[in-house]
Amino acid sequence: GQMAEILALLGEKDQAKKWRKRQMDLALRQLEELPSDAYRYYQLASIYSDLGDFETALKIEIQAEGQGNVPNIAVYKSTLGWHLAEMGKEMDRAQILISKAAADNVRLKKYTESHLGLIKLKQGDAKEALGHFEQSLRMLPQDENFRAVVLYHQAEAREAMGQRKKAK
């Protein structure tokens, strides 16, 4: 994903699309060779997620969830919960998955706090969402790319609370 992002930032959108297509083709070939490898499903789902196709990413991640050899199930739970939250679907399931991921792997907490905040924001509880986003930001390093996502959602929560000045 990073090479495609770099190419897109450099204005090479066609090259970025070609790079993602190559990644997708490789992931599909690997899945043909190892159809029970959950990691390959996750790679493919990540590509679809990067392209903004959360519906397809979610379907693929659900397939990965059913595979037996998941190397880090906490990451899958967190990502699957996040995709559900992004789409505003099955919010209770999303919250359970994300909470389990945080319990299974403490290192994910800096991300799962943001994911829980997104759920609260989508459920209309901007104040609680803001608390989750602030907690996530306290844990994320300053150079972490994911900070931009959290800051965006934090601004959404502030705007929902009527704090337009702080949201900017």
Image (cartoon, rainbow, N blue to C red):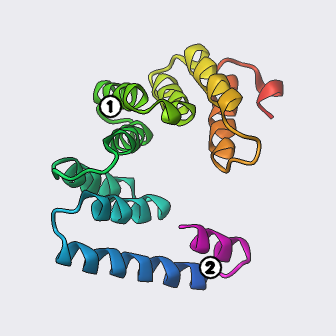
Q: Amino acid at mark 1?
A: Leu
Magenta stretch secondary structure, dominant: helix
Percent across and percent down for residue 31 are 23, 72
- Mark closer to the observer (2, 1): 1
Q: Residue at coordinates 63% horizontally, 46% vertically from top-left?
A: 146
Q: CA distance from mark 2 to mark 1?
A: 34 Å
Residue 14: image quadrant is: bottom right
Is the residue 154 above or below the residue 24 in the image?
above
Q: Residue at coordinates 33% horizontally, 39% vertically from top-left?
A: 77
Q: Is residue 39 left or right of residue 137?
A: left
Q: Extreme right residue here?
A: 165
Q: Which residue is mark 1?
A: 97
Q: Secondary structure at mark 1?
A: helix
Q: Secondary structure at mark 2?
A: helix
In this view of the protein, which residue sits in the foreground, 146 or 151? 146
In this view of the protein, which residue sits in the foreground, 49 or 140? 140
Which of the marked residues, 2 or 1, is nearer the chain's N terminus? 2
Is the residue 75 above or below the residue 59 in the image?
above
Number of marks present in the image shown: 2
In this view of the protein, which residue sits in the foreground, 109 or 158? 109
Question: Over which residues does the magenta segment extend?
Answer: 1-13
Is the residue 61 above or below the residue 32 in the image?
above
